[in-house]
Amino acid sequence: MISLTSPIETRAHGWPAGLKLAGLCAVTIVLFQMQSLWFHMVAFAATLTLYALPGQSFLRAGLRSLKVLWPFVLLVGIYHFITRSPLDGMVIILRMLTAVGLANLVTMTTRLTDMIAVVRWLATPLRGLGLRTEYLETAIALVIRFTPELLAKGTHLTEAWRARSARRPGWRVILPFTVLALDDADHIADALRARGGFDAMKES
């Protein structure tokens, strides 16, 4: 799930988070079971239609978030072109775009607090065993919240490199990107400690 909740209200915003996540799981299973190219073309077209229903702004935001998949689409396409199995490659690409697109659609129409509530409910048996599930809940929230931030910072690093050098950035931005990620993690840890850590979160 790539983006955060969309400010553009849709009918799906009012649907229960558990229902949307369960539906996403069921549809994803079906996508991986089906091998027909026509089926996956129809499924991808239906996904685009779901993005388009709330309006052009919602559609553009959804398509913009899916742009991060282009390297994987390129790699799969090249591999299946070399192995002379283009139809299989198209099936895999369409399956990936549809599955990730639907997952992103769920994220765009579901509040983070509602997702965490579903995780908390699913983790109820673990609490019965004496395990503290707030670590899991917080980790999931942080991943969903900060993945777009890290992607944006990676894009800015790449653009800064290209503005200063004619060479491709490639592996050269890995180290500064890692430093930025560690710096963000340090700030988050400081913020959690300033609020009393997980014990204080549990009491609240």
Image (cartoon, grey):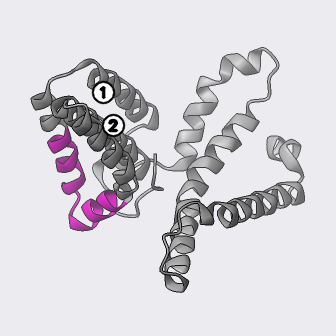
User: Which of 68 and 8 lies nearest the eye of the viewer?
Assistant: 68
45 within the magenta span: yes
Q: Point out the stretch of residues depicted in magenta.
A: 44-64
Residue 19 in picture, x, y percent from top left: 39, 31
Residue 67 in picture, x, y percent from top left: 35, 58
Which residue is depicted at the point 55% across and 79% down? 160
| Mark number, residue 27 | 1
Magenta stretch: helix, strand or loop mostly: helix
Residue 104 in picture, x, y percent from top left: 39, 47
User: Which of 41 and 191 lies nearest the eye of the viewer?
Assistant: 41
Tally the numbered discs.
2
User: Residues at badges 1 and 2 in contact (C-beta under 8 Å)?
Assistant: yes
State how far apart marks 1 and 2 are (Cα). 8 Å
Which residue is depicted at the point 42% across and 32% down? 21
147 within the magenta span: no
- The three-letter code of the residue at mark 2 reads Ala
Residue 170 in picture, x, y percent from top left: 53, 62
Which tag is nearer the camera, tag 1 or tag 2? 2
> Vertical placement of 48 versus 40: above or below?
below
Element under disc 1: helix
Q: Is residue 193 left or right of residue 150?
A: right
Residue 119 quadrant: top right
Mark 1: few/some/many CA within 10 Å (<14, 14-19, 20+)? some
Element under disc 2: helix
Residue tagged by mark 2?
A: 99
- The three-letter code of the residue at mark 1 reads Val
